Amino acid sequence: PHQTPGMSSFPPCSQEDRAMATVAVLRDKVAQLQTVNHQLQSENAKLGQAAAAVAQQEQLAAENRALRDDNAFKSADVAQLKEKVAAAARKEAQLAREAAELRRRLEEATRAALPAE
């Protein structure tokens, strides 16, 4: 068997020794892969949580947009109602002036119709 200078001589490995060494290497690889698999499962769980948080944020944003749109419509309705109230107040003031004018005319007509004392 080939021997490098300075190395002690090892007896040649038996087929059983090589098989046991291969099994040990494969067990080590399995352990490494299980560790990697566990890390990937953990990362996958984190990504799932992040995706759920993003979906929830998107839903909240959609609800917020709907509320803003609804608020805009209600603001427009409020503005219309305020204009109607202002118009009604103007009409009420006009009617009060007309009523006062009619009372004044009625008083004049009544005085004119009464015999002078």
Image (cartoon, rainbow, N blue to C red):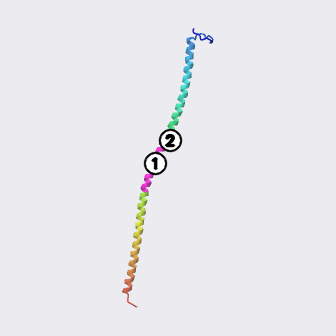
- Gap between marks 2 and 1 measured at Cα: 15 Å
Q: How many residues crowd around disc 1 within 10 Å: few (fewer than 14), some, or many (20 or more)? A: few
Q: How many residues crowd around disc 2 within 10 Å: few (fewer than 14), some, or many (20 or more)? A: few
Q: Position of residue 17 (x, y in %)?
A: 57, 13
Q: In this view, does 117 lie above or below 67?
A: below
Residue drawn at point x = 50 percent, y = 37 percent = 48
Mark 2 and mark 1 residues within 8 Å of each other at the beta carbon? no
Q: Where is residue 46 in the image (x, y as percent from the top left)?
A: 52, 36
Mark 2 highlights which residue?
53
Mark 1 highlights which residue?
63
Residue drawn at point x = 55 percent, y = 28 percent = 35
Residue drawn at point x = 54 percent, y = 31 percent = 39
Type of amino acid at the residue the image marks with label 2 = Ala
**What residue range appears in magenta?**
54-74
**Closer to the camera, 100 or 12?**
12
**Closer to the camera, 103 or 73?**
73
Q: Does the magenta stretch include residue 58?
A: yes
Q: At numbered mark 2, what does the secondary structure look like: helix, strand or loop?
A: helix
Name the N-terminal-most of marks 2 and 1.
Answer: 2
Q: In this view, does 55 lie above or below 8?
A: below
**Closer to the camera, 62 or 2?**
2
Q: At numbered mark 1, what does the secondary structure look like: helix, strand or loop?
A: helix
Type of amino acid at the residue the image marks with label 1 = Glu
Q: Does the magenta stretch include residue 87?
A: no
Q: In this view, does 88 lie above or below 77?
A: below
Q: In this view, does 99 lie above or below 52?
A: below
